[in-house]
Amino acid sequence: MSRQVFNAAGAATVGPYSHACAGGGLLYLSGQTPIDPSTGALVTGSIQAQTQQCLDNLFAVLDAAGLGPDDVINVQVYLVDMRDFTAMNEAYATRFAAPYPARTTIGVASLPLGANVEIGLIARTR
């Protein structure tokens, strides 16, 4: 079966996967960690800065598919430390407008490359 895939120029992958695959009127974006595409290194510092980088990476993939934040219908956030929930929310709220996408936030034991946050999205296609 053929997949319609989208990859953002310069964005990193840490395994055998595409940045996004489309099907059934939806675009499924792989989770993104806070890797700075200009350096290939994880962004360090505050969870807000890491959340912003995850969303920058995801929005670059959306852009490669001709979509934007208003097309996002579902978000999955994975946090290593749930004490970062409020700070993550502060950064998250600056990137989406009401009505906000549906969202799930899950506490996890660890993430790839030692990241503190990973975010995935589902968007509707046009």
Image (cartoon, helix red, strand yellow):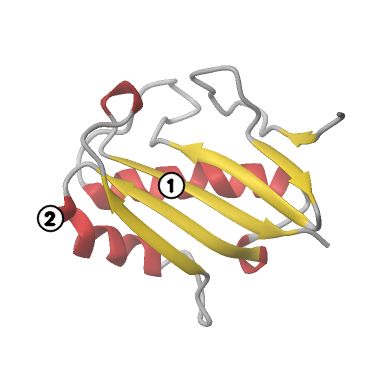
Q: Is residue 62 above or below residue 72?
A: above
Distance of label 2 from label 1 (alpha carbons)? 17 Å
Residue 32: percent from left, percent from top = 47, 38
Residue 118: image x %, image y %?
38, 41
Disc tally is: 2
Q: Which disc, if any, is residue 70?
A: none
Answer with left or right where residue 34 lies relative to residue 10.
left
The N terminus, quarter of image: top right
Residue 117 location (% of width, % of height): 31, 42
User: What is the secondary structure assignment of the residue under circle 1?
Assistant: strand
In the foreground, 25 or 95: 25
Give me the residue at 38% from left, 36% from top. 34
Residue 119 is marked as: 1
User: Few, some or many C-alpha atoms within 10 Å of disc 1 (few <14, some 14-19, many ≥20)?
Assistant: many
- Residue at 55% across, 45% down: 58
- Residue 13 position (above or below residue 55): above
Rendering coords of residue 89 (x, y %):
30, 65
Q: Which quadrant of the rendered structure holds the C terminus?
A: bottom right
Of mark 2 and mark 1, the one earlier in the sequence is: 2
Q: With respect to residue 97, does 90 lie above or below?
A: above
Q: Is residue 92 left or right of residue 86?
A: right
Q: Which residue is mark 2?
A: 83
What amino acid does circle 2 point to? Answer: Arg
User: Could you tell whether 82 is left or right of 123 in the image?
Assistant: left
Residue at the outermost bottom position: 99
**Viewer-proximal residue among 65 and 73:** 73
Amino acid type, residue under disc 1 in the picture: Ile
